[in-house]
């Protein structure tokens, strides 16, 4: 027997020996799984159906309880005459002695029927009672008829009131002698049977009218604590328990068994017809079926559950589930035939066995063909390819010998092996090219650190060829910039960790030093012994030079070349430590150039920068070599005078500095006259940290400026305390701005000649929580040199515009002037910010806002004139010069400054009645304003005489307490009205 036939027999036998037992085991396993799944499905379905039935049955309780309450309410009312007439109009006494509905117009689909025997008990009052019951049940039945089959009332005197849409003429079908009083419908609600007056159900009954199984929900009706009858609702079991009476079940031939509390059958599965043939269901008995009888005697609980996976009934196997149907306490059993459940599985198993036999035979035939035609031929083809590769010819065999058998796998592995060998050869060539052409220098040594190979980058960086260095120790490149300890640490790291990375300086062939970033790795064999070292390095000389340049930029000022703040801080800390050790003095001097801003504004930043460079040179020529001269920023310099003996030596040096800076500078043929204000503090007399020393010197510098500039001033602790107090006061003012403690008052400006109110001036006030209402002179001077004055000024403009809009909305268009500080108007974004504030109030005209600047503020910088001009031309906002006469405005500057109004300072106005010089100044300002086309306003008018004098001098518009004090916003409109009335009188 050849190999082909052996394989055929082995394959057929293997398939049959493994597949048949597996199929049988799979069948029984699947059978159990299917039964479990289907039982679970039966339980779920049955539980859902039983719960629906329970809910339907329990719906009756609230209905009947509600109906009873309605009836009790109606029956408690006293009888009225029209009700008796209504009874006789709607009822008629039949020949059989029964009162029934008058027909027509009676329609049982929309109203209740009445069956009332005519006896001596039927008094007029009872007739009214039945009429009331009918009326209530008409309304109740009509409202609930979608959810109930009928609802009725029965009493112990055979009376019936029923709303029944299924049998609308029910009362007309009842014979005169028909008596329900002994049936469960009435008897079960009697006090004897139901002393607790509970809601309940009748046993399942065969309805004589519909000839169907039914159950009734019943509830006793009491009036004045006396039982008067029974209320009920009939429910056909075929509707309530519709899932039991359906012909179409989940499984064909399913049997349903339903027993009441007493064990009487309601449904009897295959014996249902026998049950229905019985006159009394309690007489029915099942045939001899032990398994079924035992099952039906088993207790069940609420909620469906599996009872048995195998119950034999009539020689047929069933699975059984059961549940208790509440609230009646009935027991329900569902039996599904196993053969019906497993029918698809059995059909599948038969088909599977047939397929196994077919596959076995077919597999044997295919094996015979494949082995004879494919295996041997593929093996021969693979052997030939191996011989060709051995001779140098590469041929992939896997495309030809495709598949997933062992020969195909061997072919794929052979192709992979060829590709891997070719890849390794290519990698070796690549590594050689990388080594040769890499941008980094690479050197390989043996274990004794003798150079074996070096690449082209090594030669390009060092200047040595590979031939010149092979066999040498790389240490021949050393530059002596690293100590022996450095190299010992490097080799110790290589021995312990196997690699080292760092920076060092080496020497090229031409003697030039270069910096390199070097990585060295040890190469070990399989036993862990070092065989080679590989060094990879990069020339980082340019990077090191750039770092030095960056370090210089980080520590030196780009314009003057002097140390900057960073280097100054380092030097100051060093000087403080030296001073503590040598017992000498250290002078920290803070120098500010007086007049630099004027030069910078007048001649431009380029000239200002050149001036700073010349100042730095001149200062450097004065201080000695061991001292530090640094540029602190802008036109500020800090000088550290070190190793001083006494204050006389310090004063001498600072006098020379003042004299040197005061000498005129010529920059681009422009003569610049400046000076220096110097503040200094002495360490360790002023024993604080470096930052505090700078701050103290800065404070002293401001004192030098206040004293007249071009001088120096020594810091004292009292000055520091004053400054700290000032800082706290500024913080409190800032908190007041944040907490909305500021408010505006408005002082009127009037024309004495016309009697017209010209406008208002907005004056800020501070509602201080402790000190009350504060005027501007009590807090604004504290922030004049602080950026907080800008925020306050912005707030004043915004609130002024808001108040103008508020007055305008009340019909009064008022022009208001608001004060702006010099620091605010000199901000680069002043115009843009003002434009944004005006845009926020589009209904306020820019002509209604006037901004007042002090004459002295306007003189601080020539840029003020440009700001005023741009605000006028671009935004339409006018300006006024406040406190005019206190400054030193030149006529040319006044001509160039486009202010609309001059406001005469109140100091001149107040004293002009007694001081001729003040009167002359007022007169001169009025004439000057007229010459330049400006309006003029006199401030500080306190009396009628002031007004008369001003009119005589030609000033018509005035402001002051003689006109009105500053007013709260809500007082302004009232004041204007009263002022106009006074002018009319």
Image (cartoon, helix red, strand yellow):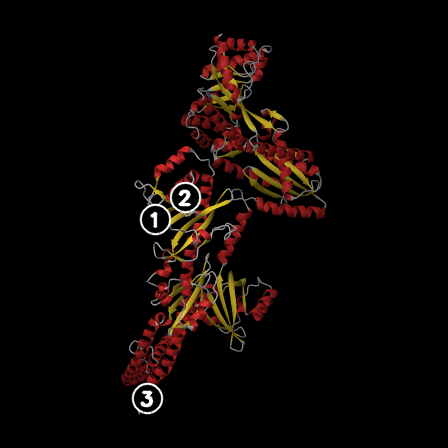
In the foreground, 894 or 785: 785
Name the outermost residue toward the top. Answer: 985
744 relative to 108 in the view: left or right: right
Q: Mark 2 or mark 1, which has the lower sequence index?
A: 2
Secondary structure type for disc 1:
helix
**Residue identifier under label 1:** 170
* Distance Cα–Cα, label 3 vs label 1: 90 Å
Q: Position of residue 1 (x, y in %)?
A: 31, 92
Q: Which residue is mark 2?
A: 119
Q: Is residue 661 visible?
A: yes
| C-alpha separation, residue under disc 2 versus residue under disc 1 | 21 Å
Q: Please, is residue 168 above or below residue 658 in the view?
A: below
- Report how far apart the C-alphas of labels 2 and 3 lie in the structure: 107 Å
Place of residue 772 in the rendered image (x, y in percent of width and height, measured from the top left): 62, 26
Q: Is residue 430 visible?
A: no
Q: Residue 338 at what x, y percent from top left?
A: 37, 71
């Amino acid at each position: 027997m050849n190999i082909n036939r052996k394989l055929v027999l082995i394959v057929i036998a293997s398939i049959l020996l493994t597949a048949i037992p597996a199929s049988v085991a799979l069948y029984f396993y699947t059978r159990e799984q299917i039964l479990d799944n289907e039982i679970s499905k039966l339980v779920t379905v049955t539980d859902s159906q039983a719960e629906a039935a329970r809910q339907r049955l329990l719906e009756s309780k609230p209905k009947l309880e509600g109906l009873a309450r309605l009836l009790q309410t109606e029956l408690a009312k006293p009888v009225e005459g029209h009700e008796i007439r209504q009874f006789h109009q709607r009822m008629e006494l039949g020949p059989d002695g029964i009162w029934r509905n008058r027909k027509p117009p009676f329609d049982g689909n929309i109203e209740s029927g009445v069956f009332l025997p005519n006896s001596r008990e039927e008094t007029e009052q009872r007739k009214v009672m039945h009429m009331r019951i009918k009326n209530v049940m008409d309304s109740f039945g009509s409202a609930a008829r979608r959810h109930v089959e009928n609802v009725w009332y029965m009493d112990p005197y055979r009376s019936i009131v029923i709303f029944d849409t299924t049998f609308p003429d029910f009362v007309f079908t009842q014979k005169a002698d028909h008596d329900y009083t002994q049936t469960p419908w009435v008897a079960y609600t009697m006090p004897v049977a139901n002393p607790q007056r509970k809601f309940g159900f009748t046993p399942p009954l065969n309805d004589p009218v519909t000839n169907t199984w039914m159950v009734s929900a019943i509830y006793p009706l009491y009036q004045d604590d006396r039982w008067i009858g029974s209320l009920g609702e009939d429910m056909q079991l075929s509707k309530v328990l519709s899932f039991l009476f359906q012909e179409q079940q989940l499984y064909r031939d399913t049997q349903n068994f339903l027993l009441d509390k007493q064990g009487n059958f309601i449904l009897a599965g295959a014996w249902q017809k026998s049950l229905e043939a019985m006159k009394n269901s309690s007489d029915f008995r099942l045939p001899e079926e032990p398994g079924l009888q035992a099952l039906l005697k088993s207790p069940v609980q609420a909620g469906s559950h599996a009872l048995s996976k195998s119950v034999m009934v009539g020689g047929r196997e069933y699975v059984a589930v059961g549940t208790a149907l509440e609230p009646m306490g009935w027991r329900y059993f569902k039996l599904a035939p196993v053969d019906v459940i497993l029918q698809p599985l059995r059909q599948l198993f038969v088909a599977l066995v047939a397929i196994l036999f077919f596959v076995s035979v077919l597999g044997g035939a295919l094996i015979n063909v494949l082995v004879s035609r494919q295996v041997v031929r593929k093996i021969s083809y693979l052997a030939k390819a191996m011989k060709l590769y051995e001779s140098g010819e590469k041929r992939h065999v896997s495309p030809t010998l495709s598949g997933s058998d062992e020969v195909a796998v061997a072919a794929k592995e052979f192709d992979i092996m060829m590709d891997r060998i070719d890849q390794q050869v290519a990698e070796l060539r690549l590594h050689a090219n990388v080594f040769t052409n890499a941008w980094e220098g690479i050197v390989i040594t043996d274990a004794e650190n003798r150079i074996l190979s070096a690449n082209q980058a090594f030669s390009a960086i060092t200047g040595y060829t590979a031939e010149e260095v092979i066999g040498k120790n790389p240490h021949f490149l050393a530059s002596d910039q690293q100590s022996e300890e450095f190299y010992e640490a490097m080799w110790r790291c290589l021995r312990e960790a196997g690699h080292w990375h760092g920076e060092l300086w080496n020497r090229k062939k031409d003697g030039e030093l270069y910096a390199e970033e070097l990585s060295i790795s040890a190469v070990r064999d399989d036993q862990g012994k070092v065989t080679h070292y590989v060094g990879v390095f990069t020339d980082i000389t340019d990077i090191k030079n750039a770092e030095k340049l960056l370090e210089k930029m980080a520590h030196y000022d780009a314009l003057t070349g002097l140390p900057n703040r960073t280097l100054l801080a380092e030097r100051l800390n060093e000087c403080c430590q030296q001073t503590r050790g040598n017992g000498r003095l250290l002078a920290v001097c803070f120098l500010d150039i007086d007049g630099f801003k004027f030069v910078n504004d007048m001649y431009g930043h380029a000239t200002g920068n050149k001036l700073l460079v010349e100042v730095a040179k001149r200062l450097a020529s004065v201080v000695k070599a061991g001292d530090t001269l640094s540029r602190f920023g802008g036109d500020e310099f800090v000088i550290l005078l070190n190793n001083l003996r006494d204050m006389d030596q310090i004063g001498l040096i600072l006098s020379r500095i003042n004299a040197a800076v005061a000498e005129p500078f010529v920059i681009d043929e422009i003569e610049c006259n400046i000076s220096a204000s110097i503040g200094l503090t002495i360490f360790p007399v002023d024993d604080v940290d470096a930052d505090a020393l700078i701050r103290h010197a800065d404070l002293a510098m401001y004192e030098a400026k206040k004293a007249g500039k071009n001088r120096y001033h020594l810091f004292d602790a009292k000055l520091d305390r004053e400054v700290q107090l000032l800082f706290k006061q500024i913080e409190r003012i800032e908190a007041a701005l944040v907490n909305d403690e500021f408010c505006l008052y408005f002082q009127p400006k009037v024309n004495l000649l016309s009697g017209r109110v010209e406008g208002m001036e907005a004056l800020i006030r501070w509602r201080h929580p402790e000190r009350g209402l504060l005027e501007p002179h009590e807090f604004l001077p504290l922030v004049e040199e602080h950026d907080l004055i800008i925020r306050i000024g912005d707030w004043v403009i915004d609130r002024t515009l808001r108040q103008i809009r508020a007055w305008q909305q009340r019909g009064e268009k008022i022009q208001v002037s608001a004060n702006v500080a010099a620091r605010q108007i000199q901000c680069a974004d002043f115009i843009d910010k003002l434009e944004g504030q005006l845009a926020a109030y589009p209904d306020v005209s820019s002509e209604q806002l006037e901004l007042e600047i002090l004459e002295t503020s306007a003189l601080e910088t020539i840029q003020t004139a440009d700001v005023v001009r741009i605000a006028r031309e671009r935004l339409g906002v006018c300006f006024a010069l406040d406190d005019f006469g206190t400054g030193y405005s030149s006529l040319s500057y006044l001509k160039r400054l486009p202010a609309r109004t001059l406001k005469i300072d109140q100091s001149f106005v107040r004293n002009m009645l007694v001081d001729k010089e003040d009167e002359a100044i007022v007169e001169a300002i009025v004439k000057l304003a007229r010459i330049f086309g400006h309006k003029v306003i006199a401030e500080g008018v306190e009396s009628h005489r002031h007004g008369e004098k001003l009119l005589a001098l030609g000033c018509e518009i005035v402001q002051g307490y003689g006109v009105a004090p500053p007013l709260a916003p809500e007082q302004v409109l009232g004041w204007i009205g009263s002022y106009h009335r006074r002018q009319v009188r």
